[in-house]
């Protein structure tokens, strides 16, 4: 996974994020998308994400991953 700098992350449009309103879970490429899915699962299991938020992140990641 390529390093994502603050400058590059700030340049992304809202459609690049799994949670665009919060600008969380950036997915500019497949490796970031796979990582976002994994982190979303962890946060969901900890109770920090709702099922709707996790589903939104997973749907976006699957789109980026071509699934």
Image (cartoon, rainbow, N blue to C red):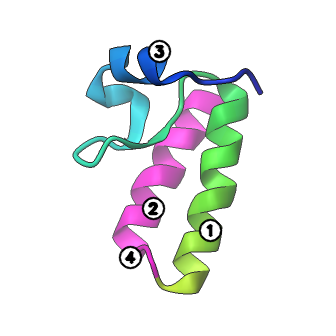
Label 3 close to label 4 by CB (< 8 Å): no
Q: Residue at x 57, y 29 (%)?
A: 64
Q: CA distance from mark 1 to mark 3?
A: 25 Å
Q: Nearer the viewer, mark 1 or mark 3?
A: 3
Q: Nearer the viewer, mark 2 or mark 4?
A: 4
Residue 30 position (above or below residue 39): above
Q: CA distance from mark 3 to mark 4?
A: 28 Å
Q: Which residue is mark 2?
A: 55
Q: Which residue is mark 3?
A: 8
Residue 31 found in image quarter: top right
Q: Residues within 10 Å of mark 4 (few under 14, many from 20)?
A: few
Q: Which residue is mark 1?
A: 41
Q: Residue furthest left?
A: 21
Q: Which residues are magenta?
A: 48-67
Q: Which residue is mark 4?
A: 50
Q: CA distance from mark 4 to mark 1?
A: 10 Å
Query: Which residue occupies the foreground of this view, 54 or 7?
Result: 7
Q: Residues within 10 Å of mark 2 (few under 14, many from 20)?
A: some
Q: Residue at x 63, y 22 (%)?
A: 29
Magenta run includes residue 46: no
First in sequence: mark 3 vs mark 4: 3
Q: Residue furthest front?
A: 6
């Amino acid at each position: 996974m390529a390093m994502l700098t603050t400058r590059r992350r700030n340049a992304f449009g809202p459609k690049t994020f799994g949670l665009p309103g919060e600008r969380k879970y950036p997915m500019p490429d497949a490796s970031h998308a796979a990582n976002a899915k994994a982190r979303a699962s962890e946060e969901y299991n900890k109770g920090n994400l709702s099922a709707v938020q996790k589903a939104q992140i997973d749907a976006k990641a699957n789109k980026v991953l071509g699934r």
